[in-house]
Amino acid sequence: MLFVISDFFNVIRNMRCPLLKVMSLSLIGVVVTSVAWAQTSVADRRLADIAMKEERIYKKIAEDPEFYSTDDIERHVTDLIGAYSAYLIDHPNDVNALILYGKLLRRVEQYEEAFSAFLKADEIDPNIAVVKQQIGTHLAEGGKAKAALPFYLRAVELEPETAVYHFALGQLLQEFRTVYIDDGIFTRDALEREMLKAFKKAASLEPEAFDLQMRLGEAYYDLSSPDWKSALLHWNRMHKEADDPLRVEILNLHRARVMGKLGRTNQAIELARNVQTPSLQKSKQQVLDEIAQH
C-alpha cells in the first residue's frame, strides 16, 4: 500500500495547519482514546496487538528520532496500515479501530482517507469527542470554518474536562474570526468573549501546561482592544512560578512588551535588556524597537 512520505520525521512533528498545532497532542503517539483494551476476544487481542506495535514504534521514534531510517519507517507504517485495513475488513464497525486507523492515516498525510474513517466512526457512534475533533480539524484545515465549528463545540460538550478541546476551539475562533463575524455567526464582542473563555478554560484544566498558559497570555493581545493589564497580571503570575531559565526570559520579554504598552517605559527597557539567551536576541530587539515607538 502506497502513501506519501517525503519526510516522515517532519510529518510526525508538525501539523499542516498552524491553527491546530495543539492537536499534535492527539496525533503524535498512540492515544487509545479512553479505550480499556478488554482481552476477552480474539478481535480485541488482534486490535490491541496492532495498537501496541504502533505505540512501540512511535515511542522509539520519540526516544531516538534517528533509530529508524526513512525506509524502516515506511515499511513499518505500510505494515500497520495493512494490519488496520485487514482488521476493518473483518470488523468494519469497530469504532476504536476506525479511530486508530484514521489517526495513523493523518500521520502519513492520507488526509481524505483519514477523514472517511472518522466520518464512518461518527456514523456508528456520534458521541465520541475525539472523532468530532478530528472531523472538525479536517474541515478547518480545508478552510471550511462554518462547517468545522459545530464539531469543535460538540467535542467540548462531550468532554468538557479535556483541555485540548477548549484550546482548539479558541484557536478556531481566533483563526476564523473574520469569517464568523462577517457571516453573522458571532458579533465581534461575542466571538472575543468565547475565544478568551476557551483559552481560560484550557489553561485552568492544565495549569502546569506551559504552552496553554502562554496562549492564554497572548489571547489578551488578540482582542480588538488588547487587554494589556490582564496580560501583565497573567505574565507576572507565570513568572513567579517559572523555574526554567529560558522560560523566565521568554516571560520577561512578554512582560517588557506589555509594560511598554502601559507606559512603564524604563522598567520595560531594563527588563528586556537583561535577556541574555542567544536564541531570544532577535525577539529582544523587536520588543525594544516596539517600546521605542511609544
Image: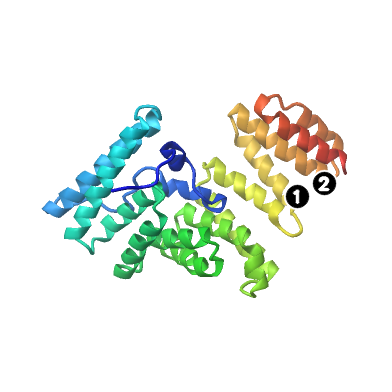
Identify residue type, mark 2.
Answer: Leu
- 160 vs 238: above or below: below
Mark 2 vs 1, N-terminal side: 1
The x, y position of residue 127, in whole percent, is: 36, 67
Give the number of the disc on residue 127: none
The x, y position of residue 165, in whole percent, is: 48, 57
Residue tagged 2? 262
**Could you say whether the residue bearing mark 1 is in a helix, strand or loop?**
helix
For the question of whether residue 204 can be seen, the reply is no
The x, y position of residue 161, in whole percent, is: 45, 56
Q: Label 1: few (<14), some or many (≥20) within 10 Å?
A: some
Which picture quadrant has residue 90? bottom left
Give the number of the disc on residue 229: 1
* Residue depicted at 62% across the width and 29% down the height: 246
Is residue 248 toward the left or the right of residue 134 in the image? right
Q: Tags 2 and 1 in contact by the CB under 8 Å rule? A: yes
Identify residue type, mark 1.
Answer: Lys
* Residue depicted at 63% across the width and 40% down the height: 238
